[in-house]
Image (cartoon, coloured by chain):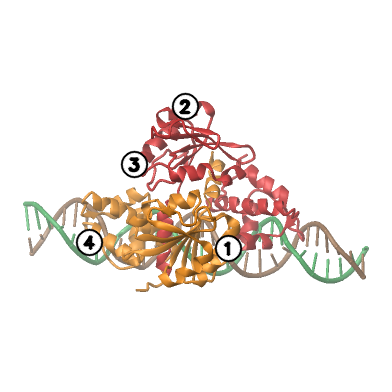
Chain colours: A red, B orange, C brown, D green
Amino acid sequence: MRYQKVPDETIRRLPRYLRALLFLQQRKTESISSQKLAEYVQLNSAVIRKDLSHFGAFGKRGTGYNVSLLSKTIRDILKLNKPQKTVLVGAGRLGTAIASFPGFKRYGFDITAIYDNSKAKIGGKIGDTTIKSTSRLADIRRSEIKMAIIATPPDAAQETADILVENGVTGILNLSSCYLKVPKRVKVRTIDLAMELSMLPYYS
Amino acid sequence: MRYQKVPDETIRRLPRYLRALLFLQQRKTESISSQKLAEYVQLNSAVIRKDLSHFGAFGKRGTGYNVSLLSKTIRDILKLNKPQKTVLVGAGRLGTAIASFPGFKRYGFDITAIYDNSKAKIGGKIGDTTIKSTSRLADIRRSEIKMAIIATPPDAAQETADILVENGVTGILNLSSCYLKVPKRVKVRTIDLAMELSMLPYYS
DNA sequence: TTGTGATTGTGTTCACATTCACAATTAACA
DNA sequence: TGTTAATTGTGAATGTGAACACAATCACAA
């Protein structure tokens, strides 16, 4: 399925909607108006309606959106309807925290492989997954992994990214504090927590 | 110092510049053009020049920007020139990773207090800092802490934020997967790593 | 002192994203 | 069946940020 000219900002917001919808499903809510959903995700309701309208008309006028239908639809759009095999590189404190974090599974991500370069860690386990040596990172090619999380020190990040991309990865969540150079077809999202914190004092 | 009408996007980018500048300082680079800096931070050079121009004219035409001057200036703008006392709430795996992360210190943040509600953790240490009970969270008032990192489970996040705000916090980095309601004067930055990852498969 | 090459600072243009506002539609109910 | 209240979907207006392009400025060398 390919949609024409959907703004990046819209795609960025879809997971927000999905998170709220999963919550509403737990509470057995059957339908929700854009107005109510907007409160949950702290946005203007018109943004939500316009975002969704890019993919079709799911709402019922007078009623709102069917929660489980919309939730399924967004998962389809984001390709989260079947488990997304994901590799984690870097099993330091941050990497370990991420590997044990239940949130990823909830959105359909399955961390099926973990790599680290420290001899002390290789062979160890996080949950059910054995930590393997980064020297074997190219093995991911065979497992058809498309998503990756980089939680290495910055000086190892680019090299890691190169190997990942070479072996089939098309999406990278980069938690190391440096920018990555990758081919256009690969989508990278870089999060540097220290930088996110750094903008806050300005407003105080 | 108060600047008029500086776009939020500009403030968000300043830490990026700062990170690159600190790197350049290490390498004893004295000056840098907006063009070169743009390569480092993966932006258009005009964006950088316009961003900086909001705060004055630091550059020299024909030469570029003096690295250490610019680095100092940005730290001044972001109020990172003196240590920012910061409290961490939640000493789970993610919280622990964050407390041990050297990046925060580099940007001027000093995690001077850590709180958790688990009896097993209270009294323990992360680095030099003792973990205290969240029941004593209001104590932060006396230490004049303005910045906070929330790494609690989502169901504790709002309550935590309320106490923090009540006791003088004006900036919150929220790593729990829920949105927070706070007064306007308080700036919140919410990062949900699972959501950041969730937008990547769409592009594959 | 004058010319040259580099680079900033910024007015203008362009592109995009948000918000508004309302017709179209639906559910509920008298 | 007709009326009312609610809510969507969307064209138009508004706002905002990014990109462009160039005059102003600077360092330096002849």
Image x and y of residue D6, in percent = 76, 65
Q: Is residue A179 visible?
A: yes
Residue type, label 2 = Asp
Q: Residue at x 29, y 54 (%)?
A: B22
Distance from disc 4 to disc 3, alpha carbons, whole Å, reads: 32 Å
Disc 4: CA contacts within 10 A as few (<14), some (14-19) or many (>=20)? few
Q: Chain of mark 3?
A: A
As drawn, A56 above or below A141: below
Please name the residue that numbered disc 1 is placed on. B158
| Disc 1 chain ID | B
Which label lies toward us, 4 or 2? 2
* Residue A93 coordinates in the image, percent (x, y): 44, 45
Viewer-nearest of discs 4 and 3: 3
Badge 2: residue crowd in 10 Å (few <14, some 14–19, many ≥20): some
Picture coordinates of residue B42 (x, y %)? 37, 49
The answer to whether dots 4 and 3 both sit on one chain is: no
For the point 54% across and 65% down, the residue is: B135
Identify the disc placed on residue A155.
Answer: 3
Query: Quadrant where the C terminus of chain B lies?
Result: top right
Which amino acid type is shown beneath numbered disc 3? Asp
Which mark is nearer the camera, 4 or 1? 1
Q: Which residue is mark 4?
A: B60
Q: Is residue B144 visible to us here?
A: no
> Looking at the picture, do discs 4 and 2 lie on one chain?
no
Q: Secondary structure at mark 2?
A: helix
Amino acid type assigned to the residue bearing label 1 in the image: Gln
